[in-house]
Amino acid sequence: MACKLEIEPTGDMVDVQEGQTLLDAALRQGVYLPHACNHGLCGTCKVEVLEGEVDLGDASPFALMESERDDGFCLACTATADEDVVIEAEIDVDIDARSIPIKDIMGTVIKREMLTPRILGLWIELDEEIDFQAGQYINYHVPGFDEPRAFSLANQPSTGKVIELNIGIIPDGEATPWIHNNVKVGDRRKITGPFGRFFVKRSAQKPMIFFAGGSGLSSPKSMILDELENGCTQDITLFHGARNEEELYYADMFRDLESKHKNFRYIPVLSDNKNENWTGEIGFTNDVAKKIYDNQFTGHKAYLCGPPMMSDACITALMQGRLFEKDIHTEKFFSRADLYKEEIKSPLFKSI
């Protein structure tokens, strides 16, 4: 039997089906609640129950401490309800966010290509188009695994039914080695989405700096292609960090974009270069950015997507260069093993 969920302070009303989590119910009806891991591990979706009772579900004791449970808090991604409930959530109004209900869509793998020795490109033709904002991600359902895996959409929204995923392999992981070794053209797969609030803040009308590491290039690629395609006139700079040229992918495409768009600049950075003929930047993206911008980032919007260590180093550099929290937007990505570590922190900026 369905019950009602009221979300304060927005006043949104959501129907919750039996056994459905509060977060899933809200997102499927186009109502945003803060979230990240979606599996009760990070605490980003923590809300206070003001009226009614919920089943806390499989919430991690580190993400939802015993004292918080006693005080009436729950994780929206694990909590279910059998009666009408009122919750209070910390929801920041984002005028650039569109209200897009998430949904499940089936699709067929039409292409696979190793973009680097460690990153697999998958192209999936969906049975219907997915509406999303460039920079968002989907959940990819892996056969034989209970939990789906989150991957950013590397294509821009204008590509119709065909989506692109860039999947980096985690050698000691479970799902990514399986995907690399087993997914083939013709396979049918289910995806769910879109998720996330990592997208260009167009209302700001500020020049943009993108930092990407490894397969974290997916979101910036989607966002940059979408901006240029839609006639963006703001300056856009992309710092793409990789260990060596072999792991630097889509370089030719970005160089071509640079030659065609005077407002776009592409700066690849190699941290472990062994090629004497390399004429580009060497080191780490945060240090190279400080050099190129003379340690002055005021007046920009920064978008970061990559491993936590890279993101943290870039955030430090940006803030030292007088760019403040409201202008730094980050999407860290973690392996499943990372999420189960006790010390993991929410990927939302306020908890870094």
Image: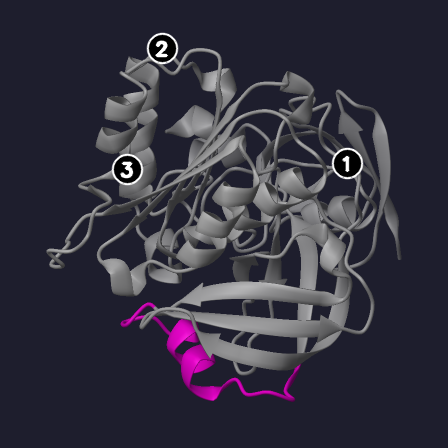
Which dot, 2 or 3, sits closer to the camera?
Answer: 3
Quickly name the residue at label 1: 98
Quickly name the residue at label 2: 322
**Compared with residue 115, is residue 194 higher up or lower down, i.e. above or below?**
above
Q: In the image, residue 35 lies at what x, y percent?
A: 58, 41
Going from N to C along the chain, the mark reached first, 2 or 3, is 3
Q: Is residue 25 magenta?
A: no
* CB atoms of marks 1 and 2 within 8 Å: no
Residue plotted at (52% across, 37% down): 44
CA–CA distance in space, label 1 to label 3: 31 Å
Q: Which residue type does callout 3 highlight?
A: Thr
- Tag on residue 261? none
CA–CA distance in space, label 2 to label 3: 17 Å
Quarter of the figure with residue 116: bottom left
Quickly name the residue at label 3: 285
In the image, taking residue 161 as reference, residue 70 lies left or right, namely left
Q: Quadrant of the N terminus?
A: bottom right
User: Mark 3 Cα within 10 Å, few/some/many (few <14, many 20+)?
Assistant: many
Q: Which residues are magenta?
A: 170-188
* CB atoms of marks 1 and 3 within 8 Å: no
